[in-house]
Image: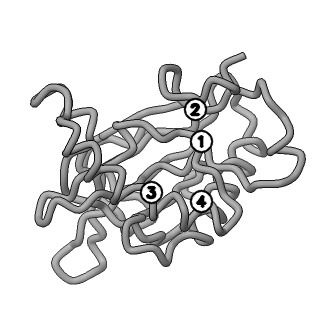
Amino acid sequence: MPEVSVLINQKYKIIRQIGQGGFGKTYLSENIIEPNSPRCFVKEFTHQGKNNSEEVLKLSLLESDRLKEVIEHPKIPSFLDFFEHNGKFFLVQEYIEGQNLEEELRQEGAFSPEAIQQLLSELLPILTYIHKRQLIHRDIKPENIVRRRVDGQLFLVDFGAAKAVSETILAKTGTMIGSAGYVSPEQAY
């Protein structure tokens, strides 16, 4: 794990770790090369239970490619960079300053029906957009939806479990990818 203030790729200064999952660790960082050192989201790819660098590279390249495919949507953080540093693979995205919906739920409690309707009216066009590009996110949950602080707009993040759609994928059930409690019933069996 990079330490706070470590410089990665002579460009990204780590501020703090903000998450960890099955595919990697994420850090709030600054791009010290750009004017005003804009903040960004840096993901260090790892793969639980394996130290196989080929597998990590394959997973990181897949996510990088998926993000490049959907980068044009204004509600998905922009893809900024992908590189190898000291034998590890990193992906860099635009950082959305705000709070995820899991944090909101803990602080404010359950959403009202009106708030849920508003949330769905913002999220469904994003999902339609990625589905038209033959991608399935596969990990839609409150933690992966961020409300931007400045204007309250919702963003869909973390495409680590996303999958390209194919006839085989659509016909296959029983493959659980995502987070327990949020995975679709047909994938839970």
Label 1 or label 3, whichever comes before in sequence order? 3
Q: Residue furthest right?
A: 168
Q: Are marks 4 and 2 in contact (CB under 8 Å)?
A: no
Q: Which residue is mark 4?
A: 84
- The Cα–Cα distance between marks 2 and 3, rounded to whole angstroms, is 18 Å
- Give the x, y percent position of residue 130: 58, 63
- The Cα–Cα distance between marks 2 and 1, rounded to whole angstroms, is 6 Å
Q: Which residue is mark 2?
A: 178
Label 2 or label 3, whichever comes before in sequence order? 3
- At 22% from the left and 38% from the top, the residue drawn is 113
Q: Are marks 2 and 1 in contact (CB under 8 Å)?
A: yes
Residue 160 located left or right of residue 173: left
- Give the x, y percent position of residue 141: 42, 36
Label 2 or label 1, whichever comes before in sequence order? 1
Label 4 or label 2, whichever comes before in sequence order? 4
For the N terminus, the image quarter is: top left
Type of residue at label 4?
Glu
Type of residue at label 1?
Arg
Q: Which residue is mark 1?
A: 138
Q: Secondary structure at mark 1?
A: loop
Which of the two discs, 4 and 2, sits closer to the camera? 2
Q: Nearer the viewer, residue 5 or 79?
A: 79
Q: Nearer the viewer, residue 40 or 7?
A: 40
- The Cα–Cα distance between marks 4 and 1, rounded to whole angstroms, is 26 Å
- The Cα–Cα distance between marks 4 and 3, rounded to whole angstroms, is 34 Å
